Amino acid sequence: MKNLLSAIAFVMVIAALSCKPQATSTNTENLDATFSTFENSFLDAYWKQHPSAAIFVGYGKYYENLVIPDSASVTNNIAFSKAWIDSLQTIDLSKLSDNNKISFNIIKNQLESDIWYQSVFKQQEWDASIYNLAGECDYLLNQPYAPLDARLKILSQHLQHADDYYKAALTSLHKPTKEHVELAILQNQGGLSLFGAALTDSITTSHLSSDEKDALQKNIAKTIQAINTYVEALKGIVANKNYEFRAFNIGKKLFTEKFKYDLATDFTPEQLYDKATADKKAYTHRMVETANGLWTKYYDKQAKPADSLKLIQMVLDKIQLQHAKPADFFAALTSQVHQLKKFIIEKNLFDFDTVSPPIVVRIMPEYARGFSIASAEFTPPYQKQGTTYYNIDDLTKFPPEKAESALRELNNYASQLLSIHEAVPGHCVQGIYNNKKSPDVLRSVFQNGAMIEGWAVYTEGMMLENGWADHAPEMELVHDKLKLRELANVIIDYDIQVLNKPKEEILHLLVVDCFQTNAQAEEKYHRATVSQVQLCSYYTGATAIQALRDDYQKKMGDKYSLKDFHEKFLSFGSSPVKYIRERMLQ
Ligand code: ZN
Ligand code: ZN
């Protein structure tokens, strides 16, 4: 969910270039006030230009608008971004406050990235899955921003030209990849359920006039028809034995550029790849030692296997049997959150008691299901009031074998790391700081995925260092396995997208070297064929945060404390670590 905006930011948009960038005065003492005016008019223009993206951040002004993703919209978007970059360049960066320097850089990166996506990467030509109205319609229909009647009217308006939307989508595709065509079929078909019985019921119970109801029903019928036509056309492409698909791997040049824009980092992919490869060796070595130490506890006098990877796997197999029952899983994780809060206060890791964040642990709502067992959920940036949720899926609703395999994966040790990552002090705490301490909405709407995932991963290691779980060897082994997954994400992303390595080699790395199940490895392989760079965000972010912490400690000397580092770091909101670094080390 957190990367939704970056994923859809490039998803075509209409709108004539009606809102011209405003000239900005410089050389005044009031430059920061001027900048904040600039920022506000930029954001409003941006959402007008990209109304579908605006829906996901909760900016309601342009909800009715739907951009027809034709070639004119691409030209128009590029012109829009260029004009705002020109306008931005008239501002003297050096005279801005720390906070605004970061905002300046975030806006610049976003606009340059938008141009690159449409003029160089050209995802609109080869990724059929970017054309899908279900996600934004789900928001329009189900977010509590207005009473139901109003939401239904907005939905009706939004869908007026759904037929043109999907027609343009088909025209825009030029030699798509097979993988994304298949994904588009699956996701668009899945999206149809949104326009089914539940929506019809809502319309019946609404207070719309009968004319309004008729118009809405017509627009929904038109949308369903358009989606079906799109899906049929894509199925035709897949069925055509002679169709020349584009290869899904993007190669070194595009990967390097995408890496730079998406992650906003100074690392090169090769630097990260080499570091991940070296780390993988080191973690494996450590796991051999830990598994050796645990062997007799779990296997008594049984002879150890000669293969050290087999040894690790056998010890992990025993640890994974220690897990909650499906009916107790929710209570176990709720209790972990309570303990984790206590721990970070006792250990003085955050100024947490004064923040007193309302994290609500709840059973995962229907609409959020199907991605992961647990997730952090925030209110959209522009929707001011709201709650931070730690969603946990209801495992009693799973078929027994599926619940068992999920619980082995989220055993008594791994589930603690999950609660650290998603809730305290991972995503939920970071999200709360982002809203409370960095009220600048810009950081929330153009949030940096590498910072956010890097933070959550960083906190797993940080909590263990500070004595969470009392250095239990089981916890160390399970945590090291998670680290291997993070490292493998970087390695296979590059292996697949740049080095074009065969699937068998990738699956071997995931299953044998990194102790994943066959099902997990297949799923990961598929994800690595339809996404690029995103799998690198966890390790890139965590590495940058760790490096910043080391350098900050050197800078502060005797005055350094972990709490001070955390408070300072999080006060910059969800900005790229490299911009935070410039401010913290200056
Ligand atoms: Zn079991
Ligand atoms: Zn995460």
Image (tube, rainbow, N blue to C red):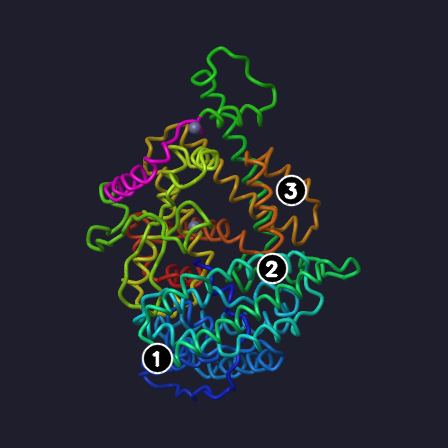
Q: Main secondary structure of the magenta part?
A: helix
Residue 209 has which mark? 1
How many numbered circles are shown?
A: 3
In which quadrant of the rendered view does residue 241 lie? Answer: bottom right
Q: Nearer the viewer, residue 107 or 30?
A: 107
Identity, as a three-letter code, of the amino acid under mark 2: Ile
Q: Residues within 10 Å of mark 2 (few under 14, many from 20)?
A: many
Left or right of 118? Residue 134 is: left
In which quadrant of the rendered view does residue 471 lie? Answer: top left
Relative image position of residue 207 (x, y in whole percent)? 31, 74
Residue at the outermost top position: 301
Q: Which residues are magenta?
A: 319-343
Q: Nearer the viewer, residue 499 or 403?
A: 403
Identity, as a three-letter code, of the amino acid under mark 3: Ile
Q: Nearer the viewer, residue 407 or 102?
A: 407
Residue annotated with mark 2: 185
Relative image position of residue 325 (x, y in whole percent)? 36, 32
Which of the marked residues, 3 or 1, is nearer the chain's N terminus? 1
Residue annotated with mark 3: 506
Q: Quarter holding the N terminus?
A: bottom left
Q: Quarter holding the C terminus?
A: bottom left
Which of the marked residues, 1 or 2, is nearer the chain's N terminus? 2
Identity, as a three-letter code, of the amino acid under mark 1: Ser
Relative image position of residue 267 (x, y in whole percent)? 55, 56
